[in-house]
Image (spheres, rainbow, N blue to C red):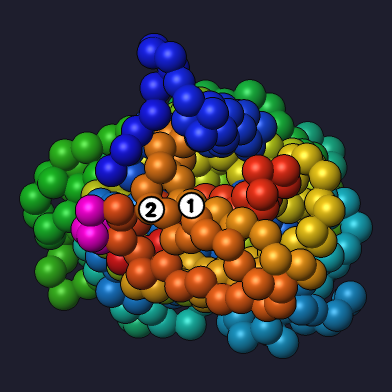
C-alpha cells in the first residue's frame, strides 16, 4: 500500500494525492473528528437529528445482553392532561388533594413535547412507578427533573426517586432525599426489621429550584451483609457522590425490583398544592453499558449529556436511535460509548441538524458526472459504488482512510458513456481486509473534476 509524502519532490499524480489528503484533513477538522479516537472509529453520519438511526463503528465496546434499555420514556407520545398511566406506568396518589401524574407541555425542556407533571400537597404527593423489573448487580438510572416549592417549606423532604423491593413492601430501598433547598442525601434502608438506615451520604448542591437538571445514577448493590456496593451520582455532569465499599442490603431474601419517581413529605411553612415536580427522558437499565452524547470532547468535562437509545450492540458496532434532547440544530457535540464496567471512550464529533457527509466537488464538471452514495452503507464486507458519465473519459476511483492515505485503487482507465458500477470488497491494494472505520471514495474525471463521499465499514 502506497502512502504519499510531501518530504520529497513529487510528480503530478502524487501531487493530486497529496492535495486530496489535505482535503480529507480539512474535512475532518470541519466536523471536529479526532484522528486518535481510541474506541470509536466512525459513525454512519456526522450530521444527525432526533430519531435518526446511526451506526457507531469501533472496537472494545464489549457486550450488552439486551441492546435496548429496560425502560425508556420521553412522554412525547402522550396527550395533554391525560394520566401518565396511559403510558404503562403504575401511579400512586398519597393525598386526596393531589392529582394523578399527567402529561404536560408547559415549562418543558427544549426539544421535548411532553413530560410528567406531579402536584404534591403537605401530606403527600403522587408518583409514577415502573412495573417489576429484573435488576442484576449493575443498575443505571438516568432522568431529567424540575421542581418548584411554594412557601419555602423548611425541613421538607423531597424524594426524587427510589429503587426498592416492591414485592412485600417499601424495603429494602435506595432513595435520595432533598432536604430544604440544598442538602442532598442518598440513603439505603432495609427497614425496621433489617436494621433501618444502613448507609447514607450527603452532599451540598447549589439551589437549582425551577430549572431542569439531569441526574445520572450508576450503582451496584453488592452482596447482603458485605460492604462491596458502589454508588455514583452525577448532576448536570458533575460527580456529586462517589461511594465504594458500601453495604446496601442486609437481607439475602430481598432485592430491588421497582423504581418510582416523585415522593414528598412536607415540613413547616408548607402550602397545599404548592409543590410541583416534572420528570422527563427517564432511562432505566440493568447494565452500565450505554451511549451518550455530550457537549465536550472529554466525558468528565461535559455539563450537558443526553443518553441514547441503543437498538443493536456488539464489540465492534452499536446502532442507536438518536435522542437529541435539548441539543439545538447546528450544535457540535460528541458521542461516547460507556462499557459495562463504566469505562468511557474518547468523544467522537458530530453535528446536530440537517447536513451532508459529502465533500464539496472540485473543478468544473464538463462530463456531467453523477456520483451516487455507496450501498449498503454501513457495510461488511463489500459495497457498491454507482456513477454515470455522458461521454467517454478517464475515470479514476480510489479509496482513502481518515489519514488521507491511499487504501485501494478501484479504477484508473478510459470508460464509455453511461452508467457504471464498481464494487469494493473492503480490501486494500495488498489484498488484505481493512479494519472497521470511516473511509472515503474519491472519483476523478480526466483530471478535471473530482468528488468524494464517506462510507463506513463495520465488522
Q: Nearer the viewer, residue 179 or 327?
A: 327
At horizontal 13% and vertical 46% (from top left) the residue drawn is 228
Our reading of the magenta stretch's main secondary structure is: loop
Q: Nearer the viewer, residue 181 or 357?
A: 357
- Residue 236: which quarter of the image? top right
295 sits left or right of 14 in the view: right
Is any part of residue 416 visible from this angle?
A: yes
Position of residue 100 measured from the top left corner of the image (x, y, whole percent): 76, 75
Question: Element at badge 2?
Answer: strand
Question: Quick check: marks 1 and 2 in contact, CB under 8 Å?
Answer: yes
| Residue to which mark 2 is pinned | 408
179 sits left or right of 51 in the view: left
At horizontal 88% and vertical 76% (from top left) the residue drawn is 81
* Marking on residue 226: none
- Which badge, 1 or 2, comes first in the chain's sequence? 1
- Residue 19: which quarter of the image? top right
Position of residue 404 measured from the top left corner of the image (x, y, whole percent): 46, 36
Position of residue 206 measured from the top left corner of the image (x, y, whole percent): 63, 24
Extreme residue in the left direction: 226
Q: Is residue 236 above or below residue 107?
A: above
Q: Is residue 347 above or below residue 416?
A: above
Label 2: few (<14), some (14–19) or many (≥20) C-alpha neighbours in 10 Å:
many
| Residue to which mark 1 is pinned | 398
The magenta span reads: 430-435
143 sits left or right of 256 in the view: right
Residue 431 within the segment the image draws in magenta: yes
At horizontal 79% and vertical 59% (from top left) the residue drawn is 367
Position of residue 208 measured from the top left corner of the image (x, y, whole percent): 70, 32
- Residue 233: which quarter of the image? top left
357 sits left or right of 298 in the view: right
Which quadrant of the rendered structure holds the N terminus?
top left
Amino acid at each position: 500500500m502506497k502512502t504519499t509524502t510531501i518530504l520529497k519532490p513529487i510528480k503530478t499524480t502524487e501531487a493530486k494525492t497529496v492535495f486530496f489528503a489535505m482535503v480529507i484533513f480539512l474535512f475532518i477538522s470541519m466536523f471536529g473528528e479526532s484522528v486518535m479516537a481510541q474506541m470509536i472509529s466512525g459513525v454512519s453520519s456526522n450530521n444527525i437529528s432526533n430519531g435518526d438511526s446511526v451506526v457507531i463503528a469501533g472496537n472494545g465496546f464489549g457486550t450488552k445482553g439486551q441492546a435496548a434499555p429496560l425502560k425508556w420514556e420521553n412522554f412525547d407520545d402522550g396527550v395533554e392532561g391525560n394520566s401518565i398511566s396511559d403510558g404503562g406506568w403504575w401511579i400512586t396518589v398519597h393525598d386526596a388533594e393531589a392529582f394523578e401524574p399527567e402529561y404536560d407541555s408547559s415549562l418543558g425542556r427544549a426539544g421535548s413535547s411532553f413530560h410528567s407533571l406531579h402536584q404534591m400537597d403537605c401530606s403527600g404527593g403522587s408518583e409514577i412507578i415502573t412495573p417489576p423489573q429484573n435488576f442484576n448487580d449493575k443498575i443505571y438510572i438516568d432522568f431529567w427533573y424540575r421542581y418548584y416549592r411554594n412557601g419555602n417549606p423548611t425541613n421538607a423532604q423531597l424524594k426524587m426517586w427510589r429503587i426498592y423491593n416492591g414485592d412485600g413492601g417499601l424495603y429494602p430501598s435506595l432513595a435520595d432525599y432533598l432536604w430544604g433547598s440544598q442538602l442532598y442525601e442518598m440513603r439505603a434502608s432495609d427497614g425496621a426489621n433489617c436494621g433501618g438506615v444502613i448507609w447514607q451520604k450527603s452532599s451540598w448542591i447549589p439551589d437549582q429550584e425551577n430549572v431542569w437538571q439531569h441526574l445520572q445514577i450508576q450503582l451496584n448493590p453488592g452482596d447482603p451483609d458485605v460492604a462491596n456496593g458502589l454508588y455514583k451520582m452525577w448532576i448536570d455532569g458533575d460527580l456529586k457522590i462517589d461511594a465504594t465499599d458500601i453495604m446496601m442490603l442486609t437481607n439475602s431474601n430481598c432485592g430491588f425490583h421497582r423504581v418510582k419517581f416523585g415522593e414528598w413529605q412536607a415540613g413547616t411553612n408548607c402550602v397545599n398544592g404548592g409543590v410541583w415536580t416534572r420528570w422527563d427522558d427517564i432511562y432505566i437499565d440493568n447494565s452500565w453499558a450505554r451511549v451518550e452524547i455530550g457537549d465536550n470532547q472529554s466525558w468528565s468535562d461535559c455539563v450537558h449529556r443526553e443518553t441514547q437509545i441503543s437498538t443493536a450492540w456488539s464489540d465492534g458496532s452499536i446502532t442507536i436511535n438518536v435522542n437529541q434532547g435539548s441539543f439545538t440544530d447546528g450544535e457540535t457535540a460528541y458521542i461516547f460509548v460507556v462499557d459495562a464496567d463504566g469505562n468511557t471512550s474518547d468523544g467522537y464529533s458530530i453535528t446536530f441538524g440537517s447536513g451532508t457527509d459529502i465533500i464539496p466537488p472540485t473543478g468544473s464538471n464538463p462530463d456531467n458526472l453523477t456520483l451516487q452514495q455507496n450501498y449498503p452503507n454501513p457495510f461488511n464486507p463489500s459495497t457498491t459504488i454507482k456513477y454515470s458519465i455522458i461521454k467517454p473519459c478517464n475515470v479514476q476511483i480510489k479509496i482513502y482512510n481518515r489519514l488521507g492515505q491511499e487504501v485501494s485503487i478501484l479504477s484508473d482507465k478510459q470508460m464509455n458513456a453511461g452508467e457504471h458500477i464498481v464494487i469494493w470488497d473492503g480490501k486494500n491494494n495488498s489484498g488484505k481486509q481493512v479494519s472497521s472505520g470511516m473511509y472515503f471514495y474519491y472519483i476523478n474525471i480526466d483530471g478535471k473534476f473530482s468528488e468524494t463521499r464517506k462510507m463506513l465499514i463495520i465488522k
